[in-house]
Image: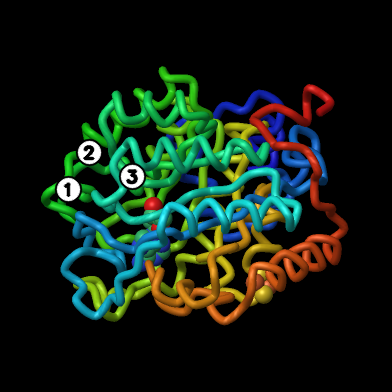
Amino acid sequence: MESLLRRAQKDHTLSRSEIISLLTAEDDQPLFDAANQVRKQYVGDGVYLRGLIEFSNFCKNDCMYCGIRKSNERAQRYRLSPNQIVETARKAVEYGYKTVVLQSGEDLWFSAEKMADIIHKIKETGAVVTLSIGEKTRDEYALYKEAGADRYLLRIETTDKNLYEKLDPAMSWENRVRCLHDLKNLGYEVGSGSLVGLPGQTIESLADDLLFFQKLPVDMAGIGPFIPHPDTPLKEVAYDGNFNLSLKMMAVMRLLLPDINIPATTAMETLHPQGRMLALQCGANVVMPNVTDTVFRKKYELYPGKICVGDSAEKCRGCVERKINSIGRYVSTGKGFHGDFLKGK
Ligand code: 5AD
Ligand code: FES
């Protein structure tokens, strides 16, 4: 195990069976330490903050795991107006965010033209714009790019095609992969990622997820523990081990993709009070504090127990920085593109 880790720290290659052995090892500390060292060497001690705007929870899809699936009649739907989105982004920039992430369900009210207009206006503030709005056509992605969008987040969720399509029978796994390739070809920085602990998900398929990210390759990837939502068909699923397994996934991902951006996800902190800081010590180098207006936060409920639903954007900004400083790290002032640290930026 020690020699496997030492080798991976240097050459960043692991076979499928080696990944499986790391994900299933009894003692996870050596893996976490190795990932932390690689993180320090390739992306440094700085942590990039991205301001997250959850601008609509309308969704045309029906993913079994997700609290804002269209069949969930208990979800209280909301949609910010384009002006409200741009205003929220301006505020995020005032709080010092260099990147804003626009996230929503797949809400058809936002036509490609409306999104392009919003992106264009936000770009005038100087912010880097990341989109996280789901599967679109290549032409739509091209239009957002022309309007100034820089990055795009689209988790593959799982590379197990059968499981993926079981969890949403109306969606096609191939189309999701097509989206990721289109985004890459159009010049976006591409983020992907997986859910960890889905019912029926195997360790083998988690290893495949990591190899998939390495092959694409992604510029960033977020790993989130699956947390069952009470108003979804998966409400009864056990999720005890998902936090620790997510940490291990992140750590192996850091070994395989040493210089990418890896967020310490909000779902990690939902399962553990120090979840994001532990993630930052197991390979992560990004945090995405919520800047959505407090009145909407609770309604954007992908999973239960989401943190910070009663807090303001200002509070989260300060809180996150204090936490980062408390573990001997600091908030980076750069824009945080893939590879910036190695370029001395
Ligand atoms: N638990 C954890 N994460 C979830 N997501 C959706 N539903 C859940 C859940 N029940 C994640 C998906 C999606 C991201 C925005 O939120 O991975 O890509
Ligand atoms: Fe929101 Fe700590 S991050 S209060």
Q: Which residue is mark 3?
A: 134
Q: Amino acid at mark 3?
A: Gly
Secondary structure type for disc 1: helix
Q: Amino acid at mark 1?
A: Glu
Is residue 10 depicted above or below 129 in this figure? above
Labels 3 & 2 near each other (Cβ < 8 A): no
Mark earlier in primary sequence (3, 2): 3
Report the Cα–Cα distance between label 1 and label 3: 16 Å
Question: Callout 2: few (<14), some (14-19), or many (20+) C-alpha neighbours within 10 Å?
Answer: some
Question: Callout 3: few (<14), some (14-19), or many (20+) C-alpha neighbours within 10 Å?
Answer: some
Report the Cα–Cα distance between label 3 and label 2: 13 Å
Say the numbered circle drawn on residue 120. Answer: none
Q: Which residue is mark 2?
A: 173
Q: Is residue 190 visible?
A: yes
Residue depicted at x 28% and y 75%: 75
275 relative to 34 in the view: left or right: left
Observer-side mark, 1 or 3, equals 3
Report the Cα–Cα distance between label 1 and label 2: 7 Å
Secondary structure type for disc 3: loop
Q: Could you say which quadrant of the image residue 176 lies in?
A: top left
Residue 48's x, y, as percent?
71, 47
Question: Callout 1: few (<14), some (14-19), or many (20+) C-alpha neighbours within 10 Å?
Answer: some
Q: Which residue is mark 1?
A: 165
Q: Amino acid at mark 2?
A: Trp
| The furthest residue to the front | 83
292 relative to 283 in the view: left or right: left
Residue depicted at x 69% and y 57%: 29
Observer-side mark, 3 or 2, equals 3
Labels 1 & 2 near each other (Cβ < 8 A): yes
140 relative to 331 in the view: left or right: left
Residue closest to the eye, 13 or 121: 121
